[in-house]
Image (cartoon, rainbow, N blue to C red):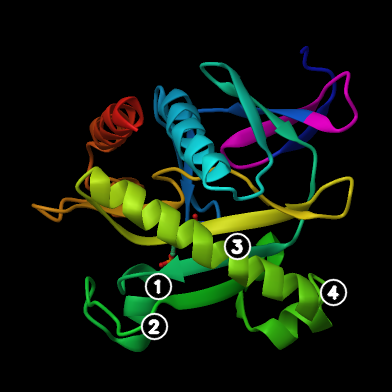
Amino acid sequence: MDKKDLLYTGKAKAVYSTDDPNLVIIHYNDDATAGNGEKHDVIDNKGILNNQITTIIYQALNEAGIATHYRETLNEREQLCEKVEIIPLEVIVRNRIAGSMAKRLGIEEGTLPPNVIYELCYKNDALGDPLINDDHAVTLGAASYEELDVVYEMTDKINQTLDNLFADCSIILVDFKIEFGRNAQGNIVLADEISPDTCRLWDADTQEKLDKDRFRRDLGGLTNAYQDVLERLQAWSEMA
Ligand code: TMP
């Protein structure tokens, strides 16, 4: 399958059309951004690592019966995926308190809440992707209430699948962000990458951060951490 036109350039990926109107090629580059693009760097091989990590995760999700955009991995930086219209919402799941929630509500990072926390952000760079609720999402025309029901049901299953998968790798899935799209049939499918760029992943024994917080917080060692995550996932997929 050949790349044709560049359809979209994101912060760390580019999307190309193909000969098939229902399929796109997603290319992972090495850019790292934080703070809505205010902080930017290029980290050698990050795209290659994230492509491989996302591949193993999406294969596991497809196998768990979750509808996703992922079809196959073409090479070290590219995946063939179903073309979708992205729903302009970021769905955030928090199994532990960290990041913006810890800061906003004054809760210590790592706190285990009594319940899983779901948040929605409106995907809009000019507004800084603000935190919204379901009623805002419907008012904005981002999704209907019926679609949100599907999104939450899928998100719950995705969280259970990923939490178990990472636990098998001795990694705590602290929180993550996912996105959904509508395919040509109008069905909602999981889309976009799932990688240490979009999840907080802590080593279960040492609590060491194995995710993009190493870049956001200037901790260094991002490539080694992503490589560690990849190797644990590879070992897991060989056992599975
Ligand atoms: P937060 O604590 O900064 O709100 O982030 C929660 C999770 O969502 C964390 O795993 C990082 C991820 N995330 C993204 O992937 N993209 C984003 O734009 C934001 C705000 C968070």
The residues tagged by marks 2 and 1 sit, at their Cα atoms, a distance apart of 6 Å
Up the image or down, 214 lies above or below 222; here it is below
- Asked if residue 15 is among those painted magenta in the image, a careful observer would answer yes
Question: Crowdedness of circle 1 by 10 Å Cα count: few (<14), some, many (20+)?
Answer: few
Which element is circle 2 on? helix
Question: Crowdedness of circle 3 by 10 Å Cα count: few (<14), some, many (20+)?
Answer: some
- Residue at point 60%, 50% (across, down): 66
The residues tagged by marks 1 and 4 sit, at their Cα atoms, a distance apart of 25 Å
Name the residue tied to disc 3: 154
Which element is circle 1 on? helix
Residue 104 tag number = 2
**Side (left or right) of 200 relative to 151:** left
Q: Earlier in the sequence, mark 1 or mark 4?
A: 1
- Residue at point 32%, 34% (across, down): 233
**Side (left or right) of 11 relative to 40:** right
Question: Crowdedness of circle 4 by 10 Å Cα count: few (<14), some, many (20+)?
Answer: few
Which residues lie in the magenta part?
10-23
